[in-house]
Structures are given as C-alpha cells and as structure tokens.
Image (tube, rainbow, N blue to C red):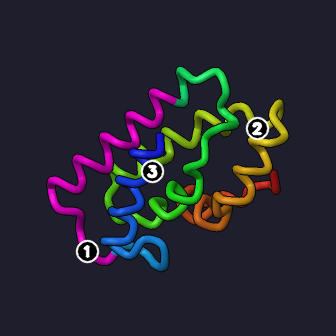
C-alpha cells in the first residue's frame, strides 16, 4: 500500500490536486497509472481482514478534486468499501471523518449528508 500511496502522491502533486480542482488533464500514462493504482488499492482493501490499517484517505480526498471521470469513479468505488463498515468500526469511522471532505462528496452527489 505504501508504494501505491507514493504513486498517488506524485500524481496529486504534479496536478495540484492537494490545493485546488484539477486544471490540466492527466497524460495517458498518468491516467493509467492512477486508475490502476486505485483499482489495486480497492482489491487489497476488499481482501484485507484489517481494514483499519488503510491510511490513504488523505490522498483519496485530494483525488476527489479531479476533472477526470474515470479517476473520480475509481476513487468513489474505492471509498465505498470502507464506508460500508463505518457503523461497526469506530477507528475506521474516525479516520474516514478526519480525511474525507463531506462538502466535496455533497457537491458530487447533490445531496446533503448527515454527519458521520
């Protein structure tokens, strides 16, 4: 997971996603690298018995600022995996709440969300 975190971190810095909405499109190579990294993270997270070890929420939150629908869909597909477990895992709920921006999710969905 650390290697995938580092790959996503490089893309986030390169495209300025840690500060603002994406202004320039991903190159074809970067797009493939980011989407495959997110897909791999999802597979690992779905297969992992200890989901509370997942520490990539800050990077996923930055990637919610992407203008690329494929990346956005991959991020949301990944976020749904731990979101399903929020009620039963207090540490997961706290980590999710600390790193995922509800205003961004609300803007994407068009719905006001109840606090976690």
Instruction: Determine which residue is flagged by label 3.
Output: 5
Place of residue 2 in the rendered image (x, y in percent of width and height, measured from the top left)? 47, 45
Place of residue 99 in the rendered image (x, y in percent of width and height, measured from the top left)? 66, 59
Is the stretch drawn in magenta largely helix, strand or loop? helix
Q: Secondary structure at mark 2?
A: loop
Q: Which residues are magenta?
A: 23-44
Q: Earlier in the sequence, mark 3 or mark 2?
A: 3
Residue 10 shown left or right of residue 97 in the figure = left
Q: Earlier in the sequence, mark 3 or mark 1?
A: 3
Local packing at callout 3 (Cα closer than 10 Å; few below 14, some 14-19, many 20+) is some
Q: How many marks?
A: 3
Residue 109 shown left or right of residue 67 in the figure = right
CA–CA distance between discs 3 and 1?
21 Å
Q: Secondary structure at mark 1?
A: loop
Q: Nearer the viewer, mark 3 or mark 1?
A: 3
Q: Secondary structure at mark 3?
A: helix
User: As displayed, is residue 113 above or below residue 84?
Assistant: below
Q: Which mark is residue 24?
A: 1
């Amino acid at each position: 997971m650390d290697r995938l975190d580092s790959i996503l971190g490089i893309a986030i810095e390169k495209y300025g996603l840690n500060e603002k909405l994406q202004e320039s499109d991903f190159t074809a190579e970067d797009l493939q690298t980011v989407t495959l990294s997110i897909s791999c993270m999802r597979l690992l997270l779905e297969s992992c018995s200890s989901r509370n070890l997942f520490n990539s929420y800050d990077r996923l939150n930055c990637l919610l600022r992407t203008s690329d629908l494929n990346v956005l869909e991959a991020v949301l597909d990944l976020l749904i995996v731990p979101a399903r477990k929020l009620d039963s895992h207090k540490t997961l709920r706290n980590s999710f709440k600390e790193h995922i921006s509800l205003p961004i999710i609300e803007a994407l969905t068009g719905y006001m969300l109840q606090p976690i």
